[in-house]
Amino acid sequence: MTKFKAIISTLVLICATSVSAQTLDTKALAEFSPATMRQTFDVCRYVKLTPEQQVKLAKAIEKENAFFIKAINDNEGVLTTKGNNQLGKMRDNTLKSILDDEQIQQYWRGVYNAEAMAEGAAIANTLQKKYGLTDQNWKFINVAFYKIALDTRMLKKVMADQPKKAAKMIAELRDEQLKSIEEKGGIRVNLDKMTVKVVREFDPNALIKE
């Protein structure tokens, strides 16, 4: 049983980090169509919104849907690239006008969570196989690269109009997480070259993940 401790603790941390609010005020949204309620839920599943925010979001979604219908009617049932981009811009503006900064960050972390989890695990698995790393170091790498992948995506999205500032914050995030791997596991990971160097002897009783 103990051989899976590192994997289990990693999953617990990731589940605690990811957000899945899944709270929809059906009473406040009773006047809206099932389709609008479902699209509203697609946002609320990642971030908790007040009933007032949910109503505002539902009304904005109705406008998006009306635009969508007009766009495909004007193009014989086809949504053009321009129309799709306009819809995306409408949704971004809707979120910015209704959600606060913390809620927006939380929402996009929810959207990108699965991708980030997959990336963190893939990197950890690759490095463990290549260097025969302990299960504990697999966990440290997995969590660190999950956080890097998640917040890199989030920052690029919410700070698209400030690319230089976003790049600086992403670089600081990477440095912080790579430092955490070294401090906890005694190994130095080169993110660009995907190499590992042992800088401090680690616990010889640490287990290897099968």
Image: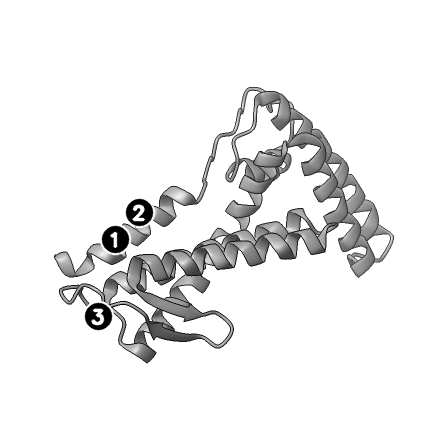
**In the picture shown, does residue 188 fall above or below 75?**
below
Name of the residue lying farthest toward the bottom: 130
Q: How many marks?
A: 3
**In the picture shown, does residue 74 fall above or below 130?**
above
On residue 12, the disc is 2
Question: In this rendering, would 21 be left or right of 32?
Answer: left
Verify CB contact (< 8 Å) between mark 3 and mark 1: no
At label 2, the amino acid type is: Val
Residue 162: x and y in percent read 72, 50
Of residue 201 and residue 194, the one placed in the foreground of this image is: 201
Kind of element beneath mark 1: helix
- What is the crowding at mark 2: few (fewer than 14 residues within 10 Å), some, or many (at least 20)? few
Give the position of the C terminus as an image quadrant.
bottom left
Q: CA distance from mark 1 to mark 2?
A: 6 Å
On residue 210, the disc is 3
Kind of element beneath mark 2: helix
**In the picture shown, does residue 193 fall above or below 188?**
below
Q: CA distance from mark 3 to mark 2?
A: 19 Å
Question: In this rendering, would 206 be left or right of 49?
Answer: left
Residue 160: x and y in percent read 71, 52
At label 3, the amino acid type is: Glu
Look at mark 1 in the image and give the residue it sits on. Answer: 8
Q: Earlier in the sequence, mark 3 or mark 2?
A: 2
Residue at the spot 16% in from the left edge and 61% down from the top edge: 3
Residue 149 seen in the current view: no
At label 1, the amino acid type is: Ile
Residue at the spot 31% in from the left edge and 78% down from the top edge: 131
Of residue 107 and residue 181, the one placed in the foreground of this image is: 181
Question: In this rendering, would 72 be left or right of 12?
Answer: right
Residue 28: x and y in percent read 59, 20
Verify CB contact (< 8 Å) between mark 1 and mark 2: yes
